[in-house]
Amino acid sequence: MIQPVRRIFVTGVAGMIGSNTARALLSHGHEVIGIDNFWRGTPANLKDLASNSRFTFRHADLISDEDWHRDMGAQDGLVHIADIVAGIGYVFSNEWQVFQRNLLINTRVARAVSERQPARFVYLGTACSYPQQMQRSVESSVLAERDKFPADPESGYGWSKLVGEIEFRLVTKNIPTRLDVLDLHNVYGWPCVYRNATAQVIPSLINKALTATDGRLHVWGDGKQGRAFVHVDDVADAIVRVLGYEGPESTFMIGPGHCTTIAEVARLIQQHPGVRIQEIVFDTSKPTGDIGRFADAGLAARELGWQPRVDFRSGLHVLIDRVIEDRG
Ligand SMILES: NC(=O)c1ccc[n+]([C@@H]2O[C@H](COP(=O)([O-])OP(=O)(O)OC[C@H]3O[C@@H](n4cnc5c(N)ncnc54)[C@H](O)[C@@H]3O)[C@@H](O)[C@H]2O)c1
């Protein structure tokens, strides 16, 4: 494992994965310097971290502010989590903006890596960068690391994440920095955005279920589309593990080996005791995205000793508890 004294820079620290990653790294004895511009993450997500003497926060925009990496050294690590990520409605109505901002963020981070040459660099990629033809059915859409190329992602978001990876591979080619990429499936957990346009499918469904006034939960699409949902605690665990990894692989698929359909998610939400929904209604006029995908995480299991541990139903119900508490 990595030396406990290593200092890790975490971009996007105020977001869902970033804040939980910072917590996991601190609990392993590391020092964390977190960076965020609060585009989507919030100061409230960092409240419990502020009192930790090994945590420092830098309010900075990765695109326009070059000061965030001023003291990054050759012994440090960088976990690059920040980007524009959102639910499918937002991503498809703002495709160019999402693409452009992510390219800008990543190219600035690449420059920082080239100048500072940290010992370790972890980049979070996504299953959305994998070919759309492989995501056409719920039953047979298993994705493994080798499937990424030839590339044909469905959205500008998927392309932006992939172009970022290519730039990071180029920048680390001739410097001592080691790059590892974790390709994540759909991540859920607390804290998350659940009531604005950027909310992703699970928080958005939970919010709809909690605010429905007619006892009906309206679901986008026919509900048959599926995703491999992975809990944020499992993602933070994968990040901690890959930072200590010294082996030959450098891309890992992170997600469970099965798909859960959106209709099943809606039913599980309906079963929560705090939810009052009598009927689930499917709106086929709305976008659904890729039909299905799930992970062959065999490489992560073999090389990192990683496997998803949080049971989906329990993780989902705890998240609903947190949203209910947050709504007050
Ligand atoms: N959430 C998922 O389902 C999922 C799935 C696959 C991959 N990922 C990847 O995981 C990462 C984080 O996801 P998340 O769910 O935690 O998202 P999030 O939106 O909660 O966190 C991203 C953070 O980046 C910050 N940010 C955005 N632009 C910035 C900028 N210019 N400068 C500084 N900070 C900036 C946001 O304010 C936010 O706090 C992303 O790289 C995403 O592509 C997420």
Image (cartoon, rainbow, N blue to C red):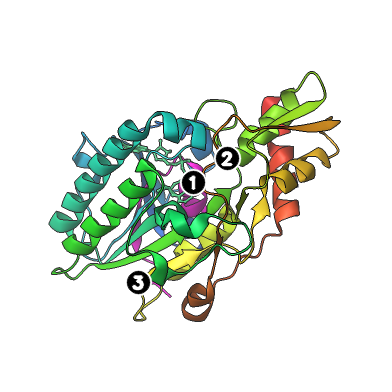
Is the CB atom of the residue marked by disc 1 within 8 angstroms of ligand 1's nearest atom?
Answer: yes
Q: Nearer the viewer, residue 34 or 90?
A: 90
Is the CB atom of the residue marked by disc 3 within 8 angstroms of ligand 1's nearest atom?
Answer: no
Q: Which residue is mark 1?
A: 19
- Disc ID at residue 250: 3
Q: Nearer the viewer, residue 327 or 294?
A: 294
The quarter of the image holding the C terminus is top right
**Disc nearer the start of the sequence (3/1):** 1
Residue type pointed to by label 3: Ser
**Disc nearer the start of the sequence (1/2):** 1
Residue type pointed to by label 2: Pro
Secondary structure of residue under mark 1: helix
Residue 250 locus on image (x, y percent): 35, 71
Q: Nearer the viewer, residue 82 or 70?
A: 82
Residue 82 locus on image (x, y percent): 37, 44
Secondary structure of residue under mark 2: loop
**How many residues crowd mark 3 within 10 Å: few (<14), some (14–19), many (20+)?**
some
Label 3 and label 1: CA atoms lie apart by: 24 Å
Magenta span of residues: 1-23
At a point 51% along the width and 56% down the height, the residue shown is: 135
Label 1 and label 2: CA atoms lie apart by: 8 Å
**How many residues crowd mark 1 within 10 Å: few (<14), some (14–19), many (20+)?**
many
- Disc ID at residue 191: 2
Q: Is residue 163 visible?
A: yes
Is the CB atom of the residue marked by disc 2 within 8 angstroms of ligand 1's nearest atom?
Answer: yes
Front tag of 3 and 2: 3
**Disc nearer the start of the sequence (3/2):** 2
Question: In the image, is 320 to the left or to the right of 135?
Answer: right
